Amino acid sequence: MASPFRERLRAALSRYVEEPSVRLFTAIGLTANGVTLLGLVVGLMAAALAGAGWLLAAALVFLAASLLDMLDGALARQSGQASKFGALLDSTVDRLSEGALLLGLGVYAVRAGLSEGRTVALVALLIATLLCSQMVSYVRARGEGLGVKTKEVGLLTRAERVALFALGLALQGLGLDLALEASLGVVAALSIVTLAQRLLHVRHELKGG
């Protein structure tokens, strides 16, 4: 179940962000899938900025892409455009955006003039973070295929993952050394915990509670 904090945050976002944005998208004729694809374009821009070393800008643009990811679902629900393909496209774009960002950071790691040891460690951490976060999403998808919902299960859902990525990028961009590695390490560690929580939840539900 969602925590009270998550529920209050979502209520505030729905009232002050989702509803006005949905009205705007509807007025200009933008579809839910169009918003999803726009989010992908913005996410790729964030990855390019990260690869160029403009980490603070990358953090802000990545947050914008994540906001569009939230709004496409709201638009689909409120406009009656919700579909199974739209849900699939949304999930696919989520994975592509996160993977592209981590790839961009891999380019940054190679180009940033870091020591050889730190470059190797950062690239290894990026790969570990990508693997762990993608597995969390994979277990959710497989669980839903078996009839078990896990979206709200675990310490680290996509919202928290996005926030940690953006925080690490922003702090590193502002000159706080090792902030990026710290945020990636937290994401990887909590993803492993969340993976275990979701696996146990699916096992419990499939055994009949």
Image: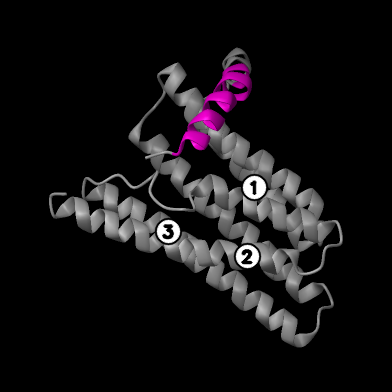
Q: Residue furthest bottom?
A: 117
Magenta residue check for 14 = yes
Q: From the image, which quarter does the N terminus lie in?
A: top left
Residue type beneath disc 3: Thr
On the image, the x and y values in percent for residue 53 come to 81, 62
Residue 29 in view (yes/no) = no
- Under mark 1, the amino acid is Gly
Amino acid type at mark 2: Leu
Label disc, if present, on residue 184 of the rendered structure: 2
Q: Is residue 87 left or right of residue 160?
A: left
Residue numbers of the magenta segment: 3-21
What residue is rendered at 49% in x and 60% in y?
Answer: 133
CB of mark 2 within 8 Å of CB of mark 1? no
Q: Is label 2 in a helix, a strand or a loop?
A: helix
Nearer the observer, disc 2 or disc 3? 3
Residue hosting label 3:
194
Q: Residues within 10 Å of mark 1 (few under 14, many from 20)?
A: many
Please say if 161 is above or below 181: above
Q: Position of residue 49 (x, y in %)?
A: 77, 55
Residue of label 1:
43
- Residue 185 occupies which quadrant of the picture? bottom right
